[in-house]
Image (cartoon, grey):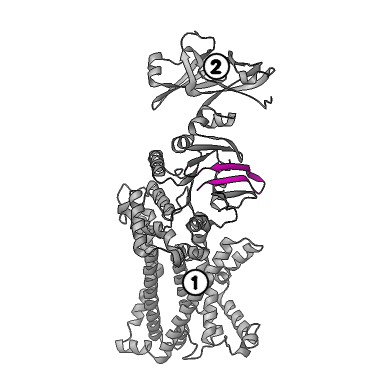
Amino acid sequence: MAWSSGKNNVLPGFTPALGYTIFYLSLIVLIPLSALFFKTATLTWDGFVAAVTAPRVLASYRVTFGASLAAAVINAFAGVLVAWVLVRYRFPGKKLIDALVDLPFALPTAVAGITLASIYSQNGWLGRYLEPHGIKVAFTPLGIAVAMVFIGLPFVVRTVQPVLEELDQEIEEAASCLGANRWQTFRRVLLPTMLPAILTGFALAFARAVGEYGSIIFIAGNMPMVSEITPLLIITKLEQYDYAGATAIATVMLVVSFFMLLCINLLQKWSRRFAE
Amino acid sequence: MSIDIEGISKTFGGFVALDNVSLKVPSGELVALLGPSGSGKTSLLRIIAGLETPDSGRILFDGKEATKRQVQERQVGFVFQHYALFRHMTVFDNIAFGLTVKPKKIRPGKQEIRDKVNKLLKLIQLENLADRYPAQLSGGQRQRVALARALAVEPQVLLLDEPFGALDAKVRLELRRWLRRLHDEIHVTSVFVTHDQEEALEVADRIVVMNHGRIEQQGTPSEVYDHPATPFVYDFLGSVNLFHGRVHEGTAQMGGINLSSPEYALANDAPAVGYVRSHDIAIERQAGDPGAIKAEVRYLLSVGPLVRVDLLLPDGNRTIEVDLTREEAERLQLSIGEQVFARPRKMRVFVDDYQI
């Protein structure tokens, strides 16, 4: 099936279609990425290791991947809840709320960053109530996570929503006829059915958070070793004309992101093993 | 367990799904709710299960009030038209589900569950497929798994909502015979909904014919088929020909023939409709009997064991359908365009809104 290029195929044009796909992906994705590796290769191995394991760089990995992971986890829970409410209940203003979910997609990231920074700052609408309780959001790693939660939410909602909509009500009725209470029905029947979609949403939200720059730098405070994200370090290095150093860090990010996405994909495949 | 349904009514928006329906289902019987779509049969089934609440009326299980009981407490097994299997669970886990969600105190042990599921797998003849997922099964196999899943919790009542509706003709036939044999073995009180009269006639102990949210007639299959109580039942069970005419003092005049219909002895030239099943008409070459109608053969079609003949009545625009056996058709050697005589062997006359 994967190599069905013969004359008997119903869909004509397999060869040009495949050729175009490979050409396009090369042009858009592979060539820029390989350029990254080539530029990195101008460094010696020791130079490369030194560039990517400098203490300040290591700290930025922790902040970036740690906050991304936390944000993706929060989004997985909150996104499922939002999707559930949007699918299962009818209430006035539902259409509006449904549209609001997409706002983080559409808003320029810098606008989001400035807005979040001003709301959570010491004198901001929310910041002024959090500050007395010792909760500092703006200009801390917590603020980075908040920005990542903001930009990642639509990914989970929009992947889980269609799956929930397609869920047959009869499945739940069957479970309750068999004696399952609401919680058992949710945990044993609904959740496993939604899990592949939740994992997809999680992966997308995570990937987006790792690569996010614009909305974070305004709220992060960008203190070295504390609240500096890796993409910012790359920009800094570029501004200092240290191109090889910048691409070295970028390469590490690329490899780590790729590896994590691979793991999530495998997990996802396992969670939908029943669909074959 | 017996089920008593007392004066159940249910409306959805402005639509009356059930209109004051009362019905008794004796313990251990297999009852078919038969009717066209929108007749309220599925609503009634769902109300018995507790998946829907009635606007008024009561449901009694074994004489005890059950109207307010939750679905989970009713101990009903429900089989859905589209199986409603849990697609992320294997066949084994699907069947075991009802046992594994029981409260800890009364939940059977792991080994006990395994034995029970294996026994059910044997009953539905799918022992080899325990580890498959529903997506890997055929429609007939899925419905059998759904049935085993419902039976696993040993329900007091088994409710089936068009259980064979989504299957192809041959599988449907096999599965309904299998269901009949199964019921003869386990004798659980069962109610099944169908719009297929053949299915109801073949499988059920009793048939309840429903239309517009009301019960038109109930009885054994032969009672319902041989003595339809209303024109609707006549029409719904099997193909039927209509003759329009009049009834006067116990004699019906239909399409040029006279019939005695003593039940309308007091009727005074009332408009009436005669119902004749298509296999209750004989075709003859000679107008021997007085009760025969002259007609022209319009169309001949072999349908399996039968030959369907369309006859054009002399008025030129109405046709009647006749089902002949193959033997009869061979004896007659009919050809299209030929003039013949049709003689109804059995006719039931209904006078519109007749009141004594």
Percent across and percent down for residue B168 are 41, 41
Percent across and percent down for residue B192 are 49, 43
The subunit letter for the residue under badge 1 reads A
The amino acid type, in three-letter code, at marker 2 is Leu
Quadrant of the snapshot with the N terminus of chain A: bottom left
The amino acid type, in three-letter code, at marker 1 is Ala
Residue A159 seen anywhere in this rendered image of the structure: no
Dominant SS in magenta: strand
Residue at x-position 54% and y-position 9%? B290
Q: Is residue B192 above or below residue A244?
A: above
- For residue B277: magenta? no
Q: Report the side of A62 relative to B122 (left or right).
A: right
> Are the residues under marks 1 and 2 on the same chain?
no
Q: Which mark is residue A76?
A: 1
Q: What residue sits right under mark 2 in the picture?
A: B313
Percent across and percent down for residue B73 are 52, 58
| Circle 1 SS class | helix
Q: CB of mark 1 within 8 Å of CB of mark 2?
A: no
Give the camera-side residue of A272 and A180. Answer: A180
Quadrant of the snapshot with the C terminus of chain A: bottom left
Q: Is residue B294 above or below residue B11?
A: above
Q: Report the side of B318 relative to A5 (left or right).
A: right
Residue stretch rendered in magenta on the structure: B1-28
Residue A60 seen anywhere in this rendered image of the structure: yes
Residue at x-position 43% and y-position 90%? A56
Residue, far front = B63
| Circle 2 SS class | loop
Quadrant of the image occupied by residue A247 = bottom left
Q: CA distance from mark 1 to mark 2?
A: 72 Å
